Amino acid sequence: MRSNNEIKKDYEIAKSRYAGLGVNTDKAIENLKKVSLSVHCWQGDDVTGLEGGGALTGGIMATGKYMGKARDGDELRADIDKAFSLIPGSKKLNLHASYAEFEGEPVDRDKIGPQHFAKWIDWAKKNGIGMDFNPTLFSHDMFRDNMTITHPDDTIRQFWIEHCKRTREIGAEIGRQLGQPCVNNIWAADGMKDTPADRMGARQRLKDSLDEIFERKFDKNHLVDAVESKLFGIGSESFVPGSFEFYLGYAVKNNLTLCLDSGHYHPTETISDKISSALLYIDTVLLHVSRGVRWDSDHVATLSDDTKQIARECVASGMDRIFYALDFFDASINRIAAWVIGSRAFLKAMMIALLEMPAIKQAEENFDYTTRFALTEEEKQLPWGAVWDEYCAQCGVPVGFDWLGEVRKYEDEVLSKR
Ligand code: RNT
Ligand code: ZN
C-alpha cells in the first residue's frame, strides 16, 4: 500500500510532465468526476435474475462457475455495494426487469410495475445514485422460436410489447423518484440460426412493435429511451432483425438514444467511429462498454486500444451527450473483481483521453499531423497512472492494486459462505 505522500509526490511529477505539453491534470480530474458510470447488476449473478427461472435461453450466455454467486436481491445489493466502494467517481445502477422482487406475489413480465422494484429504488435513494433500466426479452417461456417482439404470432408479440411498455413506465417512475433521467434500453435477443426467407417481414414486425411501445410520451427528465442493435448472437448467428442499420434508422427517425455496444459488430469494426456520426442526427448515445472475443460479445472490458479510442471519441464529441454504461458478464472469476476491473478499465481510458486530447487536438488544428501522430505514441508512456491514482485517492477508493485485497477479504468473509 502506498502512502498518501507517495501518491501526491508522483502526482506532482506527472502534473509538471503534462504541463510541459500544455495539459492541466487538475482539470482532467475534475472532468472525469463528471462522468457517471452505469454499472450493470447482471455481472453479479451471471444474468440469472431474481424471478426463479433463471436460465439464459438465447442470444447471450454466461460461462463459468466461480463460487459465491448472489442468490437474492439482498446478496446482490451487498455485492454491488462492495464493488461500488472500489470504483471511483459517480455511479448509477443499471437494472434488468428480471430483477423484480415480488414479496410472495409473483406476476409475469407483462404485469410488472414500479412497486416490484421498490427495494432497488430505496437502495438507490439511500446511496444517492441514479438508476437505468432494461426490459428482459430473453430467459422466459414466451421467448418462442428465438423471437419476442418480432414473432409472427400476435399473442406472443403483444406479451412482449406490453412488457416493454411497462418497463418504460417503471423507468419513468424511477427517474421521477431519483431525480435524474433513467435510461431504458431495449435489446431483443430475436434472430435466426440459419438464413431466413423473410427478413423484411421480421423487420416490419419489429418496427410495428416498437411504434406501439414508444407511443406513449414521457418527460425526458425522467425517462430516456434507448435501442440496442446486434450483429449476431447465440442462436441468432445468421440473422438479427435489430441490426445496426435498422436501429440507426429507427433512432434517427424517432429521436431516440442509440445504444452502441462495443461487442456487437464485426471483429474489426469499432464503435468509436460511430459516435460522432450518430451524434449529428440524434441527441444522445448510450455506450455499452464491453469486449468481444471471437463469438462472445460480453467479455470484461479492458484498457485496450479499442476502449481507449471509444474514450477519445467521447471526449472529442461531447462528453455530456453520452450515457456511459458497462455490459459484460464473466462467471469464471470473482464477480466483484470483474465489475471492478471492467469499470476501472473504462474510467482509466477516459482519464487517458482527457489527458492526451488537448495536445493532440492542438497539433491537428495546426495541421501538424506529424506531431499529432508522434504525440499519440508518446502518450503511451506518459505518467497517466499517477494522475489516475490521485483521482482514486480523491474519490476515496483504493489506489492501484489495493482493491484486490478488499475483494479477497470479502470473498473469505462473505462469498465463500454462500
Ligand atoms: C446482449 C446485449 C444486452 C445484454 C443485456 C443483459 O448482447 O448487449 O445489452 O447484455 O441486456
Ligand atoms: Zn449490450
Image (cartoon, grey):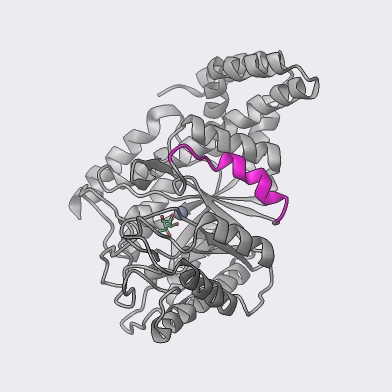
Left or right position of 65 against 321: left
Q: Residue furthest right?
A: 366
Q: Residue at x 39, y 82 (%)?
A: 156
Say which residue appears at 55% left-offset and 77% top-offset. Answer: 208
Residue 278 lies within the magenta run: yes
> Which residue is nearer to you in this view: 225 or 146?
146
Quadrant, the C terminus? bottom left
Q: Is residue 216 visible?
A: yes
User: Looking at the rendering, in which quadrant would you find the N terminus?
Assistant: top left
Work out whether 360 lies above or below 104. Answer: above
Residue shown at the point (62%, 71%) measured from the top left: 176
Q: Which stretch did the figure color magenta?
A: 267-281
Rendered location of residue 232, percent (x, y): 40, 54
- Left/right of residue 367 with respect to residue 241 in the rendered view: right
Q: Is residue 181 among what the camera can see?
A: no
Judging depth in this view, the residue of 156 and 185 nearest the camera is 156
35 relative to 216, above or below: above
Residue 108 in picture, x, y percent from top left = 36, 82
Left or right of 413, for residue 352: right
Location of residue 256 (image quadrant): bottom right
As for residue 110 lying within the magenta part, the answer is no
Q: Quadrant of residue 361?
A: top right
**Residue at 26% across / 62% down in the picture?**
71
Q: Which quadrant of the structure image shows residue 197?
A: bottom left
Across and down, in percent, residue 229 comes to 50, 57
Q: Nearer the viewer, residue 357 or 415?
A: 357
Q: Is residue 30 above or below residue 71?
A: above
Drawn side of residue 161 relative to residue 53, left or right: right
